[in-house]
Amino acid sequence: MHKSTRALLAAAVAFIAVPAAAFVDEETGLSVEPPAPFEAAAGKPRPNYDIVVTVRSTTGKPTAAGSDGNVCGVAYKQAPQNASLSQADINERLTKPEWMEVIKAPFQAWSTIERTEVFEQDGVKGVEFTVAPKAGPNHESVRMYLALWETPKGRVVVSCAIKADELPQALAELQSIRRATRIRS
């Protein structure tokens, strides 16, 4: 292969592998680098979180449930109470049924939990849910994908809301947004 062809091919592959739009906060180490067709951007501040990031699809699929066009939101909250814990200590919590009930309780107040799964990502265990909201505009036609995990630094929540009939086909894409969300130690 000619040298210039190899260089062009390498540049094309590098371009394809780079996310369309990423969010990185150097201070906290939070990064959201979703795969195409998703783009991440700083979101509006929320009182319960230190950082909020929005994720939207450049193609309009999956269809966002909200009128703002955002498929997902990623929120980060520092957790100084975790500073003395190791990641192994935090991960261990998810093996205890009583801790899982504590995690699920707030979601059960406003939604029906349809699926719960523990995942591991970069040595950090978390839990993901798919839920059906019990109230809200067009709640019958909305499904949400929620993922949360904690580190000694803080808590990350990924919350996605799309049209219910698109969830089976879109679940892998929503999980890819979760996998593209990291908190550097």
Image: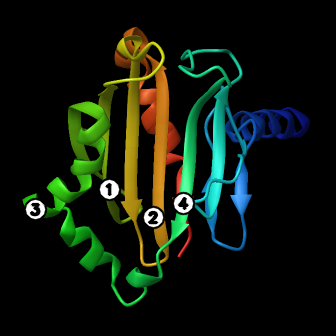
| Residue 48 image label | 4
Circle 4: residue type: Asn
* Residue position marked by numbered label 3 in the rendering: 98
* Residue position marked by numbered label 2 in the rendering: 155
In-image side of 46 versus 62 (left or right): right
Q: Residue furthest right?
A: 4
In-image side of 115 versus 9 (left or right): left
Q: Earlier in the sequence, mark 4 or mark 3?
A: 4
Classify mark 1: helix, strand or loop: strand
* Residue 135: x %, y % from top left: 37, 23
Q: Nearer the viewer, mark 4 or mark 1?
A: 4
Residue pictured at 71% horizontal, 58% vertical: 24
Between the residue at mark 4 and the residue at mark 3, the CA separation in whole angstroms equals 24 Å
| Residue 145 image label | none
Between the residue at mark 2 and the residue at mark 3, the CA separation in whole angstroms equals 19 Å
| Mark 1 residue crowding within 10 angstroms, few (<14) / some (14–19) / many (20+) | many
Between the residue at mark 4 and the residue at mark 2, the CA separation in whole angstroms equals 11 Å
Between the residue at mark 1 and the residue at mark 2, the CA separation in whole angstroms equals 10 Å
Q: Residue furthest bottom?
A: 84
* Residue 174: x %, y % from top left: 46, 32
Q: Earlier in the sequence, mark 3 or mark 1?
A: 3
* Residue 12: x %, y % from top left: 79, 33
Circle 1: residue type: Gly
* Residue 129: x %, y % from top left: 30, 38
Q: Earlier in the sequence, mark 1 or mark 2?
A: 1
Circle 3: residue type: Glu
